[in-house]
Amino acid sequence: MIALSDYLILSAIVFCIGLAGIFINRTNIIMLLMCVELILTAVNTNFIAFSYYGNDVAGQIFVFFILTVAAAEVAIGLAILTLMYRNRGSIDVDVTNSLKG
Amino acid sequence: MEFTSVLFYVFGLSFVASAALMVSARNTMKAAMLLILSFFSAASIWLLLEAEFLAVTLILVYVGAVMVLFLFVIKMLDVDQSTLRAKFTKYLPLGIVVAVIVIAQMALVLSAGQFGLDAVAEPARHAADYSNITELANLLYTAYVYPFELAAVLLLIAIIAAITLVHRKGSRSKKQNIAEQVSVQAKDRMRLVSIPSGKRKESK
């Protein structure tokens, strides 16, 4: 028998791996986007686990919308990435400092 | 240990291991491949939770479309890996410390005391003829039809935004000017020349 807490802790671990990945791969935008995808998958696992143990399909509907938004985010993120590479010749985050932030 | 528990631990281990290898991979291409493996593991976990439609969608949409887009961009940009990896170890300790702290905090909250089998009993499995898609569709096309249409609009906006961002103006694009096409006159396109019908050239 698998408890709800097992699923929640599994997705918490994957969430934190994705979070650590953002720290580790801070300079590579492609890796940052992939870590965000990993985090979203972990969150979706949480939604589905609660949906299953709570006997409510609405949680799965929410995952459906998260998938939609994530796909749109990746499409625009990669478009910006391509544009940035075309203009600067690099996708290093540290090169992108023209705003002097 | 029953069979579903074995499946859960196998897929869970594969999920965590591929995620950990993904964030620490030196090669972006390798990282993308490991992310695909972790998506497959996540889809298997979702199948255990009886979310069949979403598990298939994860593989079709994420592995089939999003990850292919990632691989396409990775190969197209031809990024120099060595410069990107120079600062790899600089933030490694900070990342690990943050991850361990967050995992510890979450494990305290999500422990078996609050969400264990005593607190939340495992629901009975559905019968073999249970259709996840039917149940999802019943809800999606009635109670959630408005957000569903908004999601469609969002995808349309994403398409337009992505095309607008990377569209290259200038000599490469072939653009038609409607006003110019409509107001064109016959004399702009056609020139009538009268060539006198020649007498036979008297050659010597």
Image (cartoon, coloured by chain):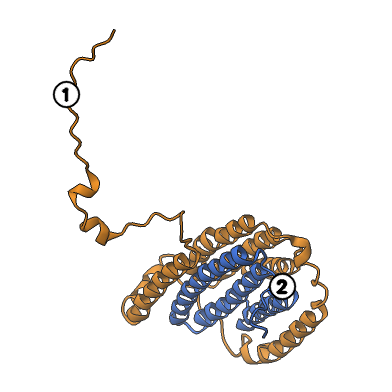
Chain colours: A blue, B orange
Q: Nearer the viewer, residue B190 or A87?
A: B190
Find the residue positioned furthest to the front. Answer: B204
Q: CA distance from mark 1 to mark 2?
A: 77 Å
Asked if badge 1 and badge 2 are on a common chain, one would say no
Looking at numbered disc 1 in the image, what kind of residue is underneath it? Ser
Q: Nearer the viewer, residue B165 or B159?
A: B165
The secondary structure type at the circle numbered 1 is loop
Q: Nearer the viewer, residue A62 or A4?
A: A62
Is B204 located above or below residue B125 in the figure?
A: above
Answer left or right for A2 relative to B170: right
Looking at numbered disc 2 in the image, what kind of residue is underneath it? Thr
Front: mark 1 or 2: 1
> Which residue in the structure is indicated by mark 1?
B197
The secondary structure type at the circle numbered 2 is loop
Q: Quadrant of the N terminus of chain B?
A: bottom right
At horizontal 58% and vertical 79% (from top left) the residue drawn is A43
Q: Quadrant of the C terminus of chain B?
A: top left
Number of on-image labels: 2
Is B134 located above or below residue B102 in the figure?
A: above
Answer left or right for A55 relative to B2: left
Whether residue B22 is visible: yes
Disc number placed over residue B81 in the picture, else none: none
Label 1, residues with CA under 10 Å away: few <14, some 14-19, many ≥20:
few
Where is residue B89? Give x, y as percent: 83, 73
Query: Contact, CB < 8 Å: mark 1 with mark 2?
Result: no
Quadrant of residue A65 within the rendered picture: bottom left
Where is residue A21? Give x, y as percent: 71, 74
Label 2, residues with CA under 10 Å away: few <14, some 14-19, many ≥20:
many
Disc number placed over residue A27 in the picture, else none: 2
Task: Give the chain of mark 2.
Answer: A
Task: Give the chain of mark 1.
Answer: B
Quadrant of residue B73 within the rendered picture: bottom right
